[in-house]
Amino acid sequence: MNPIIKNLLWLSHEIGREDRHLAILGEGNTSADAGDGTFWVKASGSNLSTLDEADLTPVRFDAITAALDDTKLDDSGVREVLLASRADAEAKLPSVETFMHAVCLQEGGAQWIGHCHPVSVLQILCSQQGAAPFLQHVFPDEIVVCGRHLGVVPYVDPGIELARSVRTELRRFQGEHGSAPKVILLVNHGPVALGQSEKEVLNILLMLDKWARILVGNFSLGGPEFLPEKTSTRIDTRPDEHYRRAQIAALK
């Protein structure tokens, strides 16, 4: 089996594990850059926990990019674009979130993407608080694994318009911070993890889940005690934390 496919199936199964509460039924999607102008993405409606090779579809970046730049294209033409974008005409229809995955892989500089709907994170993103609690930090490891700053996109229906909004946020974020985020929070929807390996993507989602559960507990006890901004920046730039970040990324 192609190593990318093997690792993408591993990532999908780990995200889809019932005990993790990150995704159920047909929720969530994963992707990986194939390095040849195409990427693999979960097929529409398939289940992450039971995904097999036939549920991964190879898609051409150029076809998706052209569609994103076509200002006349709306949701009514999306299915035809997705079918035409397949590098293998026999492959299944790719996820409607294929557009977002292409943006994150190309403009976000990621090699692997994981998107899901964790109960813990949605408790916050679907509340009156929205993404605001994630814009400050409460413990060091969330900074080490998830990054000093997170991208945020207000609610947009899944599909091509959401991908365009994610692209706008990625460009804004890179202009402000000089690099892409490791996490994009889609308000009322769920997180997107951008990683350089399948392991990094899973690490990001697991740490984000822990972070969210801690925040929910904090709010039940009077509210979070956020770290000072100076402290958060120091944690992000400390040499020993850079070393630990690399070690964590290599963990199985």
Image: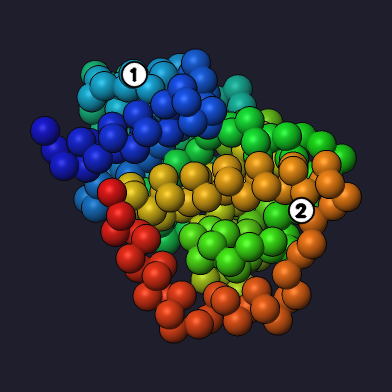
Report, in whole angstroms, how far the alpha carbon at label 2 lies from the one at label 1.
33 Å
Is there any visible trace of residue 84 in the rendered image? no
Q: Name the residue furthest left.
A: 1
| Vertical comparison of 249 with 81: above or below | below
| Vertical comparison of 226 with 95: above or below | below
Q: Residues within 10 Å of mark 2 (few under 14, many from 20)?
A: some
According to the picture, the residue beneath numbered tag 2 turns out to be 133
SS for callout 2: helix
**x and y, in percent, of residue 91 in the image:** 27, 21
**x and y, in percent, of residue 230 in the image:** 70, 81
**x and y, in percent, of residue 242 in the image:** 42, 76
Work out whether mark 2 precedes mark 1 in sequence or the reverse, and give the earlier one.
1
The answer to whether 212 appears left or right of 249 in the picture is right
SS for callout 1: helix
Query: Which residue is pictured at 34% across the width and 49% down the height?
Result: 199
Q: Residues within 10 Å of mark 1 (few under 14, many from 20)?
A: few
According to the picture, the residue beneath numbered tag 1 turns out to be 50
What's under tag 2, amino acid-wise? Pro
What's under tag 1, amino acid-wise? Thr
Is there any visible trace of residue 150 in the rendered image? yes
Query: Which residue is pictured at 43% across the width and 33% down the height?
Result: 15
Query: Which residue is pictured at 37% across the width and 60% down the height?
Result: 248
The answer to whether 17 appears left or right of 124 in the picture is left
Q: Quadrant of the N terminus?
A: top left
**Of the residues tagged 2 and 1, which is closer to the observer?**
2
Query: Which residue is pictured at 32% across the width and 22% down the height?
Result: 51
